[in-house]
Each structure stands twice: as C-alpha cells, then as structure tokens.
C-alpha cells in the first residue's frame, strides 16, 4: 500500500460511536438481535413471536405509548416491527417520533399492515420505514425480510465503525508522525504505521482515502477486488473518474454538500465496475478536518451488496407473486385493480372483473397428488393468459381461483359485459384440450366464472369489486351455471340499457322518434333558423325528452343509427315543405361517436343528396369532444361535407378542453355560447366575461355567434346592449315544438 499527502488532522465526530474494543471486520451481533414488536392484536403478536423467537430476542409492546416508554427506559432493539393501525397513536406517528430521536433514528422500521394502496406505502416510507409486511402474515416472508434488514443494518453499522476507526488511526498516525519528526523518533511512527496498515489491508470492505481535492491517495486490496481497478490505476486519480455512479439521486455534488455540513454520509448507491458491470453498494464517507477546520482527507468505506439485493428481489417476488405460476398474487391484483378502477372512475372508461376456478380441483389433488395439481394449475394459468388480451391483468388469488381484470377501455357497461363474456368463452374453448400428465394420461378440466362490471358507486374500492365478482362466481356454482354476473343495482342499469337499446331499435323502425325544433333569431330578433330537437313518443311511457334515451344510445353504436334516422326524416320533412322553409337554416346535432365512424362523411352526404333539401340551409352541430382524438381525420370529414355546401357549428363552446389552435383548424361557420354562461351572465361577472370572450373569438374567426339560454327579457336586453351582433336562441322566443307545427305556426 502506498500513501500520499500527510498533515496535522482532526477527525470529525461521527454518529453512533461504537466500542473500540471490537476488532475490525467483526459483526456487531455477537448475541441474538433484539426485535421490538408493536401491535395491539394478540394474534399478530403470537404469530410474529413464534416465527422469530428462535433467532431473535423479542420485545413486545401492545401500543405505541408502551413502546416509547420501554425505549425511554433504555431498551434498544435492532429492528422495529410496527403495526400501522393502532388506537390512540398509530404506527406512522410512532415512526415519525423514532426518526426525530438521534439515538433511535438509525434503527430500521418495518410496518405491518393490511393496507395495499400506493398512498399508504408512500406515507409509510415518508415516515421513515424501510419495508412493509402485509397481512395476512406470511411466516417465510417475515423471517426473510427481518433477516435481510438485520443483516443490512449490521453491515452498515460495521462499516460506520470501520470508517471511524480508520479515520481516527489515520489522524493518530499523522499526529504521531508530526511529533516524532520533531523528536527524531521514527521507529515508533513506523510501528504505528504498521498497525494502521494491518487494519487498512485486512478488512473485506473496499476502502479509499482521498485528499481534499478528491484524488485517491490510498486503496486497499478489497477496493481493487470489488471495483476491478488496480492500486496503480487508482492512485493519483480523481475519485469521480473511477467512481461512476449510475443513479442520479446520489450524485457527488449532493453528497459533498451533505458532508460539508454533517461530516459523515452513508447510503446505498449503484456503481459501475471497471468492466462496465453495474452493482449496488452500501457506502459510508467521513470527512477529516485539520485544526483550522479545513478538509484534508475523505475516507470512504463500501461493500458490494449484490447478494442482499438479490434476496430483496426474491422477497419482492414472494410478496407479490405466486411461486407456482409466476402470476401476481391477491395483494398485487388488488393493487392493480385499484389503479384500473381509478382510471374508470376519472377517465370515463369501463372494465370487468372476472373470477374463475377449476371445477372439482380438489379431486385432482386427492387422486393424483399435489405434483399433478401444480401442473394443472400451471397449464390452466397459461391458457388463461392466452385467452385474455395482452394488457389484461391476471392473478392467482388462492388455490385454483384466478382473477382477471380487463384493461379499461372507452366501453359502455354493456360492451364491457359482452367483452367479458367473450373472454370467458375463449377460456372455455382453451380448456377443451386435455391436460397431459405422465402415464395417467390426460385430464379434462372445466371452469366456472363470475363477472362484475365497473364503474359503479364503489368503483374506488378494489376489495369490494373483487368480492362482487367472487359472489357472482359462487352464484354460478350454486346454480350449476358456467358463468354468472353480479346482481345489484348496477345489473339493473344494464338491464335497463339493454331494454332501451331494444326499444330504441323498434322506435326507429316504427317511426316513434318525433321531430321537434326551437327557433333561432338574428340580432334584430327576426327568425333566422331552427335547431332540430327530438323526442321519443314512447307507446307506454309517453313523450320522452332526449335525456332519457340519447345518453343510452351514445354508450353504444346505436347513436349512429339513431342520428342517421333523424337526419333522413328531418331533411325529408323539410324538403316536403320547401315552399315555406327554403330560406330557413336547420341545425342538426351530431355526436362525437357518430363523427368517429369511418363512413360518416359518405353517409351524411348520401342522406343530404337523397333528401333534395338545399345543403346551404343545413348546419351540423358538433361539440368540442370531437377534437379529443384524431383532429386531422375530423377536419378531413368536415371538409368533405362543407365542400358539398353544408356548414358546421360548434355547440356548447367554452365547456370543453379544446385549445384555440385546434379550434381554428375546424372549418366551422358558427359557434354557440353555452346556455349556462348566458343564464348567469346577468349576476356573475365571470360568466359575463366568458360570453364576451366567446363573442370576440367568433369575431376574430369571422363566424356567426349564437347565444343559447335566452330565457327572459333581461337576457335578451343584456345581449342587445352588450353584444348586439349575437344571434339568439332560448325559451324567451319559444319552447321546442313539433317540426311540422312549427312551420305552420310561423307561416301565419
């Protein structure tokens, strides 16, 4: 070993002063490590104590207050197992208090919890936890996690001790050398150097001593063994050149800033060996300062913790994965389901949860043994995977029971149900091929399924969603059916959806859709056009407003058939009254789902041409939702129709999320101010400002602006005073009336 750069130094104080009598390289735990279990549930305490008592001394506290009292009396465990949900003070608060006490903050905390959501994990880690053990408690997982973190803590404490010892010996040797040089007693300095070198060279941890600039002045053999850099390659070079960390969180600048304040840093980093291999390190760094407080050296001690990380990975697999199939287990499935349900709830999507199991699986185990059972489970899992879509999630919940959650899509619940049935049908088809097993031949297996659809009011509760599917599964078993759906208010909605869909198809055929219209007026209050509004003349329920059937139609492609029927009938009626309506512009609403159809432009142009009604008098009203997806395709369809002579209006402007840049791309001739802004503009300055803004946008685009919601004289006067160029529509001028009577009344 060669050493460069000496001078008078003083070692900074380090946390966790350790016994100097222990030899370097000896692990801290010469006796059983102590574990403090803090839990108010006697069953959990008994399970944890039984699992760990052979290798650890167990300290039990039934509350956070009792645990803190024991700590105040001097108890010092090597690890805490801490329940989150406890009365009075919960585990999170206790953990925060532990981390505020210098003598306790270095002790690792593992939380015990039944919570599986990501938010709870984030709170736990923010409080200072190092890991989680989930209920129901798995004994192998508990033992492995405790062993891993005890080992990690022991290694870190040992490295802190080693770092401090080496720093102090370096300090002592340099100070001794300075005195002996004055006294010309070099022999004693050499002896001290030999002691220091023995300590430096014998440890299994990698060690590097740096000068104040970060240049390496000394390394030990373990440094070369771990990093791959020889002593000759390392000495005299800047540490950062060789120490190429690949994680951005622990960069050199941050570590140096921390050392400048605290004089000691420890943590886990990912480093790169000379051959380019990335590996995890546990590292401590100490600052050595001279009497004038200037940094003279840094001592860094590190170890390769690849084996520990591999153990952690195996623990992660044990926690989240089924060992037989490799599929997610129940805990991970609930976590995935939680994410899916949130997407459904906030993103307007739908999904289905399916629970499926193997019929008479117990017979397989009892007759052919558990080895055969595992083969059947693995084969069943593989066929489930092949039957599902690639982005669907599948988990082994327990025994032969599997859970499936379909990747959320822009489906209606009815569509989600149909997709779920198709998935189950593919599962049944996949099971027709027998499962081969040794000399016994092949086994034929069948499955039973239960389905629950979402979103519902409980769509943010994954445990309830799974329970619904399991209930449906049990119902299918009890009724000797292959598959069943969960029966609750949600399924009533599906029945209503299907009933409306069936009746609406009949209504189109039987011409039960009644054509109504509402007048639109020019700024000088002359009749300028109409907006077509439909009603359903239901044979049993009477006249239904659009809110009672249009939303149902929009959930399926039935809105396409309905709107094309409306366009055909309306234009046909207008054509018959050509003498009275030739100069009357008619606006017809078109849904975004209809616009998305590939043949939209061709179908609409065909209906307009067949009607004989002048295209120049036809306006199709769209909402901003048409711009959610492929704007280029929307513009292309609109241009085709506009080139034929029809125009477009953007309805309910200001209520969507489209940008002005997108708006300017649309070939529109009119924008309509949403009625909610007009209704409140008299008393709400914000609404009045929005009305003014929309009018100005219309003027800048040189398009007509129509204000909906003109219901009173005050509304009409407000618009005439402040926005005299705006067209008007609302109850003040008349309520919607049947299309044919509308023209008769206006002709007089």
Image (cartoon, grey):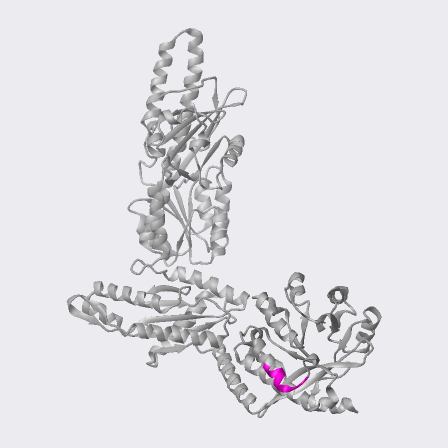
Q: Position of residue 261 (x, y in %)?
A: 54, 32
Is 87 placed above or below 567 here?
above
Residue nearer the viewer, 603 or 196: 603
Q: Position of residue 370 (x, y in %)?
A: 22, 64
Closest to the observer, 345 or 477: 345
Q: Residue furthest left?
A: 439
Q: Residue furthest toward the top? A: 184
| Place of residue 440 in the rendered image (x, y in percent of width and height, measured from the top left) | 16, 69
21 part of magenta stretch: no
In the image: residue 122, left or right of residue 437: right
Q: Position of residue 309 (x, y in %)?
A: 36, 45
Residue at far front of view: 643
> Magenta includes 608?
yes
- Image-based side of 133 in relation to 9, left or right: left
Q: Quadrant of the N terminus?
A: top left
Q: Classify the position of the C terminus by image quarter.
A: bottom right
The quadrant where residue 700 appears: bottom right
Query: How many callouts does the rendering have?
Result: 0
Region rendered in magenta: 606-613
User: Magenta: predominant secondary structure element?
Assistant: helix
Q: Is residue 268 visible?
A: yes
Instruction: Give the residue displayed 53% in from the left and 74% down from the top.
Output: 598
- Residue 460 in view in this figure: no
Nearer-the-camera pick, 469 or 426: 426
Q: Residue 73, located in which quarter of the rendered image?
A: top left
Left/right placement of residue 149 relative to residue 672 reads left
């Amino acid at each position: 070993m060669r050493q460069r750069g000496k001078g008078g130094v003083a070692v900074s104080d380090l946390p966790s002063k350790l016994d100097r009598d222990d030899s370097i390289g000896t692990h801290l735990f010469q006796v059983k490590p102590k574990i403090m279990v803090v839990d108010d549930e006697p069953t959990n305490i008994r399970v944890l104590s039984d699992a760990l008592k052979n290798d650890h001394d167990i300290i039990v506290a039934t509350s956070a207050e009792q645990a803190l009292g024991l700590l105040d009396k001097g108890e010092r465990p090597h690890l805490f197992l801490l329940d989150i949900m406890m009365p009075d003070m919960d585990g999170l608060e206790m953990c925060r208090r532990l981390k505020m006490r210098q003598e306790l903050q270095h002790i690792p905390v593992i939380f015990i919890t039944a919570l599986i959501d990501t938010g709870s994990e984030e709170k736990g880690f923010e409080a200072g936890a190092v890991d989680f053990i989930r209920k129901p408690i798995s004994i192998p997982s508990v033992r492995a996690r405790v062993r891993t973190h005890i080992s990690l803590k022991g290694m870190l404490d040992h490295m802190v001790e080693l770092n401090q010892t080496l720093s102090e010996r370096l300090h002592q040797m340099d100070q001794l050398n300075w005195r002996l040089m004055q006294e010309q007693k070099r022999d004693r300095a050499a002896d001290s150097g030999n002691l220091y070198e023995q300590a430096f060279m014998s440890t299994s941890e990698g060690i590097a001593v740096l000068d104040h600039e970060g240049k390496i002045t000394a390394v030990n053999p373990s440094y070369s063994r771990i990093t791959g850099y020889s002593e000759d390659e390392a000495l005299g070079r800047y540490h950062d050149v060789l120490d190429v960390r690949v994680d951005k969180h622990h960069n050199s600048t941050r570590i140096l800033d921390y050392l400048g304040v605290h004089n000691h840093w420890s943590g886990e980093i990912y480093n790169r060996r000379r051959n380019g291999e990335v590996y995890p390190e546990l590292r401590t760094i100490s600052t050595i300062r001279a009497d004038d407080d200037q940094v003279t050296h840094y001592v860094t001690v590190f170890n390769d913790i690849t084996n520990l990380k591999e153990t952690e990975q195996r623990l992660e697999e044990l926690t989240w994965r089924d060992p037989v199939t490799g599929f997610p287990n129940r805990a991970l499935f609930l976590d995935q389901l939680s994410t899916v349900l949130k997407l459904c709830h906030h993103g307007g999507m739908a999904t289905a949860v399916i629970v499926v199991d193997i019929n008479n699986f117990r017979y397989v185990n009892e007759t052919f043994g558990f080895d055969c059972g595992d083969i059947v489970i693995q084969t069943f899992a593989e066929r489930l995977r092949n039957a599902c879509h690639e982005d669907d999630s599948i988990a082994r919940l327990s025994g032969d029971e599997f859970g499936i959650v379909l990747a959320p899509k822009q489906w209606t619940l009815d569509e989600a149900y149909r997709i779920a049935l198709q998935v189950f049908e593919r599962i049944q088809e996949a099971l027709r091929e027998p499962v081969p097993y040794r000399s016994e031949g092949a086994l034929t297996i069948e499955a039973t399924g239960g389905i629950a659809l979402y979103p519902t009011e409980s769509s943010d509760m994954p445990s309830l969603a799974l329970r619904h599917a399991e209930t449906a599964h049990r119902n299918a078993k009890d009724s000797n059916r292959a598959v069943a759906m969960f029966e609750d208010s949600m399924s009533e909605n599906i029945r209503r959806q299907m009933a409306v869909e069936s009746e609406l198809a009949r209504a189109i055929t039987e011409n039960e859709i009644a054509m109504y219209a509402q007048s639109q007026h020019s700024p000088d209050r002359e009749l300028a056009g109409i907006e077509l509004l439909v009603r359903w003349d239901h044979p049993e329920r009477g006249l239904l407003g659009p809110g009672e059937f249009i939303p149902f139609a929009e959930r399926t492609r039935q809105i396409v058939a309905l709107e094309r029927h409306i366009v055909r009938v309306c234009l046909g009626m207008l054509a018959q009254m050509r003498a009275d309506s030739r100069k009357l512009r008619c606006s017809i609403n078109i849904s975004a789902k209809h616009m998305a159809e590939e043949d939209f432009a061709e179908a609409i142009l065909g209906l307009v041409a067949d009607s004989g009604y002048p295209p120049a008098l036809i306006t199709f009203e769209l909402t901003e939702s048409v711009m959610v997806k492929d704007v280029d395709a929307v513009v292309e369809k609109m241009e085709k129709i506009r080139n034929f002579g029809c125009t477009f209006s953007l309805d309910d402007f200001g209520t969507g999320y489209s940008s002005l840049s997108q708006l300017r791309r649309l070939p529109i001739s009119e924008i309509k101010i949403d009625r909610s802004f007009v209704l409140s503009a008299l008393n709400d300055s914000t609404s009045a400002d929005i009305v003014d803004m929309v009018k100005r946008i219309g003027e800048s685009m040189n398009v007509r602006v129509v204000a909906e919601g003109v219901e009173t004289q005050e509304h009409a006067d407000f618009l005439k005073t402040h926005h005299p160029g705006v067209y008007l529509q609302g109850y003040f001028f008349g309520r919607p009336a049947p299309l044919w009577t509308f023209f008769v009344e206006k002709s007089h």
